[in-house]
Amino acid sequence: MKLILKSPESLVNDRLNIFKKDIPCLDSSWHYHQEFELLFISQSNGMRFVGDSVSQFSAGDLVLGGPYLPHLWRNDSSYSHHIQHPKKVETIIVKFRKGFIGKDTFDLPEFRTISELLELSKFGVSFGKTTSNRLKKDLLQIVDLPAALQATKLLEILYQLAKTQNSSYLSSTDMSQY
């Protein structure tokens, strides 16, 4: 697979962008970008490529990837064979810059746990189903919130993710592309 740098030109703003995607991803775009990415799979399954990790994904998958970390989520081929009655796919994608809530916010001591999580995201952090289920309602609702509430809700979600013991690293090494 060819590695591609995706440009943020198509994003609504350069600090925080949240999308709901309901089409299968069968694209071979192994890519990276300068934003953090929190990806929640509400309904779908296939193969997940993050750094040097290759594994299955399914509904409830929740992953935080750091800037410049190569990744790809690819639905299995059965998603392309159901043209008349397509299989249901629903993902929530949150792309954000470290300064989405303020330039030096995460340098403050009260945000240390979130800052540590963001640092570890260079490996890709996968959160277990317990954490995913606990945050599912917030993740599904964040798409429809006004921009200011999206930012504060993301801050709340990141805090919850930083405090969980139910996580694992995906890539065994920092594969960030600069």
Image (cartoon, grey):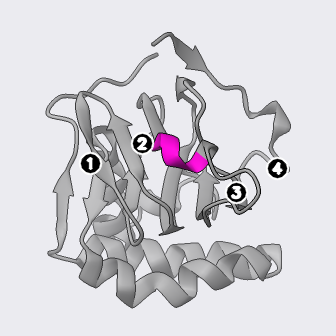
SS under mark 1: helix
- Looking at the picture, which amino acid does disc 2 mark? Gly
Q: Where residue 146 sits: x, y (%)?
A: 83, 80
**Lower position in the chain sequence, tag 2 or tag 4:** 4
Labelled disc at residue 66: 2
SS under mark 2: loop
CB atoms at circles 3 and 4 under 8 Å apart? Answer: yes
The residue at which mark 4 appears reads as 13
**Lower position in the chain sequence, tag 4 or tag 1:** 4
**Lower position in the chain sequence, tag 1 or tag 2:** 2
- Looking at the picture, which amino acid does disc 1 mark? Leu
- Main SS type for the magenta part? helix
Looking at the figure, which quarter contains the N terminus?
top left
**Lower position in the chain sequence, tag 3 or tag 2:** 3
SS under mark 3: strand
Per the rendered image, the range of residues in magenta is 75-79
Q: Within 10 angstroms of label 1, few (less than 14), some, or many (20 or more) residues?
A: some
